[in-house]
Image: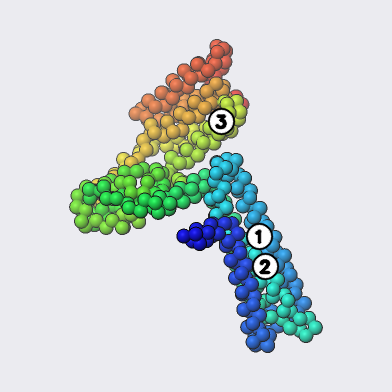
Amino acid sequence: MRFPRRFSRLRAGLWFIPLTCVMAGVALSFGTIAIDQAYDYKLVPQWLSGGPDAAIEIFGTIAASMISLAALVLTITMVVVQLAMGQFSPRIVQQILQDKPSQLAIGIFVGTFAHAMLAIREVQTDEGVVPGVAVLVAFVLVVVSIMVLVWYVNHIGLSLRVSALIELVGNDTRKLLDQIYADVGAANSDGSTIPAPKSGVIIRIDQDRLVRVAKAGGCVLRLRPALGEFVPAGAPLFDITGNRERLDVNAAMRSIEFGLERTLDQDMAYGLRLLVDIGERSLSDGPFQDPTTAVQAIDRLHDCLRQLAPRPFPDGRYRDEAGEVRLVTPSMTWEDYVHLAFDEIRLAGSGSPQIARRLRAALEDLLAVAPPERKRPLQEQLDLLRSGNGDSMSEAVDRNNSSQADPSGLG
């Protein structure tokens, strides 16, 4: 038991994969040199590999550049660790240092360095000896290193997302859970539901495909979670009304795409959520920290709701060619969008004349263009805005000034 435990700890270290790659680079160098020696250094012509001076320059340049790239990756990794410690948790360092793509990127660079440094010894300028196979392999490793560098930059950018860091810890915890509590227990499904195969946020729904699947199965599917909602693994995903026996469950599952976080592919509410987050963050330390940024966010919220106000909303029911309902999904209402756009910014900006004036201008304009059945939530927002500012401003002059609509806030 002691040896597997120690080996597991070694594998979890930052240096294990890079060290393995260094050993692979050394073995690759010896192997290519042996091939060159077996063919008396004539397997690859010098017009392709270059002369002795060119080979020395090539190996030297590759070795220097690989060390620089390895240092760059280590620096970026340390910066990511510091950012994660400051913004999320100091206890997340271990998970970041165990990130396999980062270790692999370092390993590729140091492995290429080891190959170049050992192969350069075989170049003999006096006798015109050039290890052509080693030179060609070095070229290939350089191309691979460039691809790995681009891939690593993309990976580290995605890894800095809050959802990616949270999932990093959550995924390790789920693996440990499966080891300690291996017995999954009895299934609770009664046959009328389809459980989610994995956890994640629903980022895309292929409604047309689900309608075809439900029609072929002779049933009606009701999607329980809404687009953009997080679903735990094993939680009910679909309710089935009708005959389940003919339903292609796998095809229904393939019609739902899961991700780490919400996207703007189909989820319009997420766009409003992002604008609200920007506005709230600018007011996080008080209504007077950065109200201009909040006003700019309100500008876009106002524009989106103005375009949305007169348009009919789908009811979440999708029908086949015969007009029969086959799929039912949760859908946002006009009142949901109004609350999403204004509630939190109104509360965060309470006491700021600029926020109050800009919100009033947006709400009054929306009241002018919204159909009669959609005016009530807008009027409620105006009433709440008026009472909130009245409570947060002690002077009548300030309350009167804030009650004036102004598309620019305070200019």
Q: Are marks 1 and 3 in contact (CB under 8 Å)?
A: no
The residue most toward the right is 126
Residue underneath mark 2: 113
Residue 91 figure quarter: top right
The residue most toward the top is 396
Instruction: Check disc 1: other Cα within 10 Å, few if <14, some if 14-19, many if 20+.
Output: many
Q: Looking at the image, which is closer to me, 252 or 152?
A: 152
Residue 201 in view (yes/no):
yes
Going from N to C along the chain, the mark reached first, 1 or 3, is 1
Cα separation, mark 1 vs mark 3, equals 39 Å
Residue 365 in view (yes/no):
no
Residue type at mark 1: give it: Ala
Residue underneath mark 1: 70
Q: Looking at the image, which is closer to me, 178 or 40?
A: 178
Q: Secondary structure at mark 3?
A: loop
The correct choice, above or below, for 37 with respect to 371 in the image is below
Seen at 38% across and 31% down, the residue is 335
Residue 200 at x, y percent in the picture: 41, 48
Between disc 1 and disc 3, the foreground one is 1
Instruction: Check disc 3: other Cα within 10 Å, few if <14, some if 14-19, many if 20+.
Output: some
Residue type at mark 2: give it: Phe
Q: Are marks 3 and 2 in contact (CB under 8 Å)?
A: no
Residue underneath mark 3: 284
Q: Are marks 2 and 1 in contact (CB under 8 Å)?
A: yes
Res. 156 mark: none
Color style of the picture: rainbow
Seen at 40% across and 30% down, the residue is 370
